[in-house]
Image: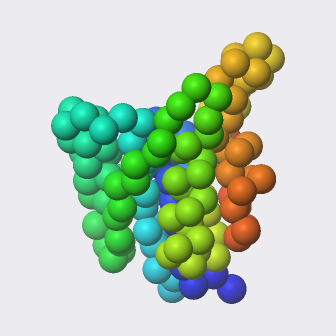
Amino acid sequence: MYKKIMAAVDGSETAKQALMEAMNIANNYNAALCIVHCLKGDSDADKKAGTQILEESESCLSALSVETRLLEAEIEYGSNGVAEAIAAAAANWGADLLVVGTANRRGLERFLVGSVAEQLVAKVGSSILLVRPPKG
């Protein structure tokens, strides 16, 4: 069913859970897996931190062959550049499934910050699996 699975990571625990789900699905379907991280800035420090997130994510999947991509988003006030960059990467790579963690924000925080996961649902043409944080 799934041949190409993309997982978006940001270094959070929920993103790590999403990555584990993506790995399990990739193993079950013998699918290719691509891990992406989207930068919110273009400084050397941002790129180094993003590369480290990808390397840490990839190291969790040592038994699986994984492709990684560092994406750059155009961030302006009111823009959803991160979601646009991830959606474009999923489309360009031909992902059948996009797996992302969701911060599960509510109320005013969700209104002010928005949700990359919610924006992705509106932008991505493939199936999307949203992984929620554990109840605690």
Where does the image place residue 102, in percent across and percent down from the top left? 64, 40
The colour scheme used to paint the residues is rainbow
Q: Is residue 98 above or below residue 43?
A: below
Where does the image place residue 92, in percent across and percent down from the top left? 53, 74
Whether residue 125 is visible to the viewer of this picture, yes or no, is yes
Q: Quadrant of residue 114?
A: top right
Residue at image point 31% right, 59% down: 58
Left or right, residue 36 beside residue 135: left
Residue at image point 50% right, 75% down: 93
Q: Which one is in front, 20 or 52?
A: 52
Left or right, residue 72 beside residue 25: left
Residue at image point 62% right, 35% down: 79
Q: Is residue 97 above or below residue 38?
A: below
Q: Quadrant of residue 116?
A: top right
Q: Which one is in front, 135 or 48?
A: 48
Whether residue 13 is visible to the viewer of this picture, yes or no, is no
Residue at image point 51% right, 64% down: 89
